[in-house]
Each structure stands twice: as structure tokens, then as C-alpha cells.
Image (spheres, coloured by chain):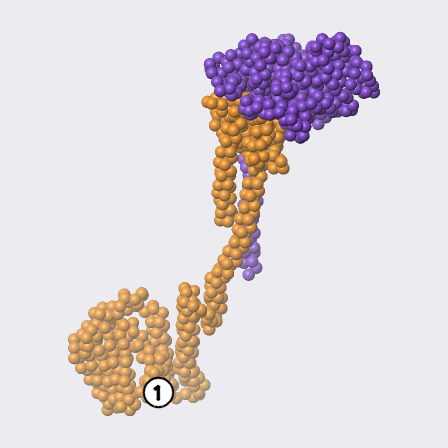
Chain colours: A purple, B orange
Amino acid sequence: MNNRLRVLSALLCLVFLLTALSGCMQVTFEDSASGAPAVLPRPTRAAANAPVGDSFARYRLRTTIYYYNAEGSLTSTLRLIDVGQGQDRFVRIVEALLEAPYLSSSLSPIAPEGTRLIGVESSGGVVTVDLGAELLAAGEEAVWKARAAIARTFLEQGGVTAVNMLIEGQAVEAAGLPLGALTKQDGAVSAGYDQLLAERRRSEESSDESARLNRVAVVYVPEDGLLLPEAAELHALAADLPEALLSAFLTANGLPDAGSFSLEITPAGRRVARVRFPGDFPMDPSIAAALVFTMARFLPAVGGVAIDLGGEPLPAVGPAPCGEDQAFAPGDLTQLLGSEARLYFPRADGTLAETRRALPGFGLTGRALLAQLLEGPDATQELEPVFPEGARESDLLGVRVEEGIAHVNLSASLYGACQSFDAARERAFAYAIINTLVANLDSVTQVQFYISGDFADTLAGRISILAPLMADPGLVR
Amino acid sequence: MAFTIVDLSLMQLIGEYLLGQKVREEERLTDDIATRVATTYAGHDAEALYGLARALAAENDGRVLVTDMWGVVQSDSDGRLNGTSLALREIADVLSQGGSSYGYYNVESGGGWFALSLGNSSVTGVHVSAIQSGREQIGALAFVSNAQELYGSLSHIQRQIFTWLVLVAIAVLLASLFLSRAFTKPIGELNQGILRMTKGDLHTRVRVKGNNEFAQLGRAFNQMSAQLEQLNTTRNAFVSDASHELKTPLRTVKILVQTLLYQDPMDPDMARELLGDIDREVDRMNLLVSDLLSLVRINSGAMKLNLAEVPMADLVGDTVRRLRPMAEGRQISLRCDLWDEVTVVGDSTKLQQVVYNLVDNAVKYTPAGGAVRVELSRSGKKAVVTVTDNGIGIPQKDVPHVFERFYRVDKARSRETGGTGLGLAIVKEMVQLHDGSITFTSEENVGTVFTLELPISGPQEKGGAAQ
């Protein structure tokens, strides 16, 4: 009996052992990570053609342009526009709008033939198009239609949020009402004009809520001594629009709402907007300049803006003295206009923070943007510098924009300094540059790095720079 | 072993099915995502591509990475791997050959060096499809999924199967123990019975239940045991009787010898008479031993028949002729009627002894003036010999025992005539060896008729019984 029990116990143990072994065999996935890393293909190409100095290669811009068809409705057409070296794409777009569309004889340009393009400003999503007086001569309706076509075309461009049209640097009006900027243009143009006429009638006949007008004004805000445009909504009776504009300007600039407005006709016959402030108003030249642009570019036919501070007219705004009528003209202060660059600086955790900085003029260049990154973040911001210590502008050997790629040539010494980067620092360095260039340079979608004129595998061992890299929005927090 | 094989096979089948399903689903999903990002990626709109990747990743509970034609990540829904070379076999395969590929990674085992983990999942699947712009491949799309759930499901199923198999194994084991006991118990009992029997306990029997083979074996064993017991009893009785039979003449011899030795003086005539008695006793013992040996040889199967064709008329006639002087000496009429010429196949010597014993008994147990008649006839396929006397007959109470060994109806007469009490027992055994039969009818003080029937064709061949 004992033998039998021993045999049975042994059998039972064997059954358990075998079953347990099979039960303990874990489900396994064939781990693809075993073995050496896979070999990826490498780009095969001719010798590097790294940039030296700055250049912006000509390219063909594929974009939608709106023209008027025979029925008077806006019709979109796809156009390929040559943008030459150093040319601004927005300028080329307006030029295309003013040209006769070659695709179809049923489409007509948006302005009378011979209408000049005086200038295009693009900053912070606000595009300001200044056309010649030829458009005025074509009549109010022509002005209205041109404005609609320009707005429709630009609002479909990436990054444009408001479009303001000027004629000879002055704001336009229709039906005696200021038009301001457009932030959307999706209705029928003729219907919009009819609505404008109805607005005028209401404003003349009534002063209640129904007569209030909705307008978008471009207010200018000083930033680092330069003026940057912003769109501001106004909702007021026609007669109160100037006051509403002033109030919006003061609000946008964080100033006390302590001004008053009046419109004057000077002996020379120039319409001047006069704004009066109390003596203790915190006025400075940049605010004054911003006010000039704000008022002059909304109120129709205003040739200048006079500013009184405690009853005394400001004699000068920066280097620009006032005119005989104590007014300042925007044309005298255009050097103060700037465009906003979106710059990316790293945080301590390796993510990127977007900061905006005003830069003079329009049409930022790659070098200018990289120079801003080289300058580093503002001291008030808790951000890290992009470039390693000791980097100079001479380390930026060249930047060229060609066919949507910004080619950036860095020096060998800068490359050497990057070798001490850890993974987060390396990633932040690469994408601060890439994100900055992509965000600010027209048509640029990728960045190709060169080191002393040649290709390199990686920046500091992890980020591949063999081929162009796209921006990384995910790194921006 | 069987359970292990079943467990492994089941796990293999289930794992392959579930894994295969997941692979196919995610392959389709990856192809679909690759199609959906193609246009955005071709336009190099990083913002839109990132937004799309995040939306698709959230929609499908995974992670989406877009690489260029050199395996460098251009968009990562997790925002961690942009600019990194994704040196995976699957990426390399798709970039070099197009189509799609997949693989699974156990991040905890070191596969996470490229930070491809997905949340807390340690087992991740990577499916890669080509991104096409028209007919041109422009990159690769990697969809990273959480395989932990699948892994967990398989492990859960495996545990379930394991648990059930263990329970079933225990149940089967218990059942087999129970069944084996049902088989081994009767064998054990039989074995015990055999062991008891070998130790001499011929009374032993085994319990028998049912009608299966074990029950049949048990019954056969019990039958054998009963026969052995019977044989043992018979043997003991036989030895006892034999001893007793031998003891009587030996005692007589002893007395005669002692008389010869101690009686002094001994009359020479007396001495001669005593020696004659001793001589007769010795002859009786000789005859007894001879008869015993005959019986033993018959019972053990050692007695061989020398079969030949035996003319029964000659045999019966010769036997009667040999006994006629004794019959005449007793004043008994001995008649022989041979009605048929019949020849049987048999042992002539043994048959002669049978007929001789029957006629001898008839003569011995018929008083003077009586008659004994011997007849031979044929009845069908048998030869029939009848021996009829008008002697003292056999009492009814002795009829069942007439053929028993050492049984004497008239012990005094038997001793007087020199009988051993084995004659009819030997006759019966010899007749049975020839497949014949011996019967008798008797009436006390009237007479007895012994009828011997022998098959003409002789005995059927039995192992060792006939030559």
C-alpha cells in the first residue's frame, strides 16, 4: 500500500509539474528589438550647396486669387505666381490681383488698369495694402469691390487674420462711413454694399442700438520701440466711431481712457484728427506714433493726427516734428512700423516657448531671425538661450530659402560647441531654429542644416540633419 | 504530458488567432492613416500634420509617427521623437520595399531605447505603412499600439486554461485511481486467494460480483479450489484407506511372525501353516499395492492405452475359460453366450482385466450351486457385455458405493477371497478410459447383473490417455 501511495504521489507531482510548466510558459511576443538596429536608407545627392550669406531663391507660389466674373461675383482661380529673389509674396499677390487674369477673358482685375500698388505691410496676421489714388477715381463701388477681393484673397492665405486697405496711405470710406479692416469676406460683395447703404440710412435716421455699426480697426501697439498692428472690434454709432477707436487704442495699450477726439479742417484744407489728453497722461513718442497710425488708418481722409497733452500740442514724435497744423502724418513715421517675429526659445525642461518680438520693417530674413535667436530671450522671461555660450553671428555662415526649404549653414566651431548638448538641449536647439524660420519666412516649411558647408549626420548624436526637417509644433508648450 | 501538449496547443492556436486578428486590424488601420496624412505631409504643413497625427492617435488609442524616406521622424503625435532616426526593422523594410510591415516590442526588456513605449504599456505593436503621393512613396507612417491588452488577455486565458487543466487533471487522476482500484481489487483478492491456497488453505474462495471477466476468473478459481479441495479430501481418504488396508495384512503378518518367533516349541506343521498364511498376506499386499499403483496411474493420466482392434468374442471367451476351473471348484455353473462377433478399438489387456474382474466377482459372490452367465452382443455402435449371477446380491444401501475404492459390501468374504476392495474402482476407471460405461442392477439374495458397454470405435483421442 505504501508503494502504491508513493507511486500515486509521484504521478500526481509529475502531472502538476508538467501542467505547471505549460502554464508558466508566458505568452511571448517575438521581441523585434533583439539584434542590431535596422539600417535605414541614406539620401544620395550631389555635393552640398550650402549657402554663404543670405539669399532667397525665386520660387513659384501656388495660391488662390479672387477676381470678378461677368456677373460681378468673386471667383477663385488658382494661380502660379513667380516670386523673385527678395520679393515679398504678398506684394506679388497684390500685383497679380491688379493684373488682368490671363486664364479667362470673363474675369476682370479688381482695380482699374493702372492702379498702383504703393505698398503691402504684413505683421502679426494683419495685412495692410496701400493702393494708388487711381482706384478712388473709379468710384466708391470700385473701392468697395477692390477691398472685398483683396480681403478674400489674403484671408485665405495662412496666418492672415485681418486685411486693411488704404489709398495713398489713407483710410477708405464708402457711403460716407469708415470701412476699417476686414476679418472675413464670405458673402456676396453686392449684398455687402447694399448692407453698407442700409447702415448709412440707419445711422442718419436713428441713434438707437440698431444704428450702431460694427467695424474692425487696426490699432497699433508699441513694442520695443516699433509699432505692431492689432485688430480691434468697434461697435458704435457712426458719429461715435472715432471715440470708440480712441478707446480701443487706449485699451489695447493699457492706457487710461482719458482722451477726447475732434476732427478739424486746417486752413490748408487738410482734415486733421485732434486728440486731447490731460497733462498727466503717460504719453511717450512711441505711443504718440501708434496713435497717429491708428487714427489715420481708420478715419477716412485724415491727413494727419494732432496730439495735445495738457492743452499743449506735441511738437514731435520721435525724430519726426509735427507739421504746420501741429499734425503728424503716418508717412513721416513709417520707419517706426515693424513686424512681429515669432521666436522660439527653450525652457529648462527642453520644451519651446513662443515669444513675439518686434522687428523693424517687413519681410523678415532668415539671418535676422537667427540673429534674434542669437540675442537670446528677454531677461524678464524664464527662458534659456538657443545658442551655446560664445556663439556669434559669424557662426551663421549663411541662410538661403529655396523651394520651401531654408538652408542654414553653421560654422564648425558652433557645431563643436553643440556636441556637449544632451538630448533635450540638442532637440531644443534644432527646433528653436526650425520653428522660428518656418513660422516667419514665407513659403518655408523645412530647414536643412549644413556644417561648414557640408552635410552632417546629426547635430549632437541624436537629431538627424542629413535631410530637411519640418517644424515640431508638439515641442511648443 | 497530454495536458501539457493540450495546454501548449491551445495557447498556440488562441495566441495565433488573436494576434493574427490584431495584426490584420492594425494593418488596415495603419494603411488608412497613411492615406489620410499623405496630402498634409506632402504639403509639409507641420502644424496641420501634427494636429492630424494627434487626432488620429487619440481616435485609435495609439501613437502616430510620420517619417521621411530616410526614417527620420518628421511628426510625432507624442511630440518626443521629431528629428530622430527611427531605426526599426519595420521602417527599413517599408522604406526599401514599400507596402507594410509590423513588429512587437517588449519595452521593458530593453526595446525602449528608442522611447517607443505607449503609456504604461510594456508590450507595444508597431505597424508601418508607406505614405504615397500619387505613385511616389514620400515617407512611412508608423502606428504604435498597445499590445499589453492582448498580452494580458492571452496571459489571462492561459491562466484560465492552466487552472482548468489542473482541475481536470486532478479529476482524471482521481477517476483513474478509482477505476484502477476497481480493476486491481479483484486481482488482488485473487492473488490473496492463490497465496492462501499455496500455503495449504484449500477452503479458500474469492468473492465474486457481477459477470465480467474478473467475475468469471473468480468463479473459475473457486471451482478449481473446490476441485482441489475435493481431490485433497479424496487423496487423504485414499491414503487413509490405503494405509488402513495395508495395516491389516501387516498386522496379521506381525502376529504370525511373532507366533513363529516366540512360540516354543513350534509344531512344524503349525509353522508351515503359519508361513503359508504369511505368504498369502504378502501376496494380498502385493496385489493391493499393484492395484493402487494402477489407480494412481489411471488418475494421473500416466496410464497409456495400447489401442488395437480387439475381437471381443475371443476376449470374453478366453476370460471365461480361465475362470471356469475356479467356478467348477466352487460348484458354480459358468456359461458364455457370444451372440455377436464384435470388434472394438481398445487396450486388449485392460479390457481383459475388466471382464476378468466382473466374472471373478460374480463367481466369488455366488454360493455353491449357483450360476454365472456371460453374454456378448452388439447394440448399435456399442459392444455390450453382461455378467449375470444369482448370487448374494448387493444391498440397497451399498449400491452407491460399489465403485468406490476399498469399498466392500461383504468385508469378510472379500478378505477371504483375497480381494483388495479396488477391483470395481479399477474396472470403472478402465471402462471410462475407453469412453465406455459400466452399470449394474442387483437384488439382495437374488442376484446381480453387471452391464459393460464399450464404443466400437474406441476412445476419443485425449491428451496422453491413448496411443
Determine the residue positioned at 42% across, 78% down.
Answer: B237
Looking at the rendered structure, the kind of residue marked 1 is Lys
Q: Quadrant of the C terminus of chain B?
A: bottom left
Q: Residues within 10 Å of mark 1 (few under 14, many from 20)?
A: few
| Residue A398 image offset from top left, x and y in percent | 64, 11
Observer-nearest of B130 and B290: B130
| Residue B60 image offset from top left, x and y in percent | 55, 35
Considering the numbered disc 1 on the image, is that residue within a helix, a strand or a loop? helix
**Can the viewer see residue A309 in this picture?**
yes
Asked whether, in this view, residue B320 is left or right of residue A292, the answer is left
Determine the residue positioned at 57% across, 42% down.
Answer: B152
- Chain letter of mark 1 equals B
Observer-nearest of B300 and B108: B108
Determine the residue positioned at 56% across, 47% down.
Answer: B159
| Residue A450 image offset from top left, x and y in percent | 62, 14
- Residue indicated by mark 1: B397
Q: Determine the residue located farthest toward the front in the rendered image.
A: A205
B100, above or below A146, in the image: below
B301, above or below A74, in the image: below
| Residue B80 image offset from top left, x and y in percent | 63, 28
Q: Count the marks: how many?
A: 1
**Can the viewer see residue A403 in this picture?**
no
Determine the residue positioned at 77% across, 15% down.
Answer: A307
Asked whether, in this view, residue B289 is left or right of residue A289, the answer is left
Asked whether, in this view, residue A277 is left or right of residue B462, the answer is right
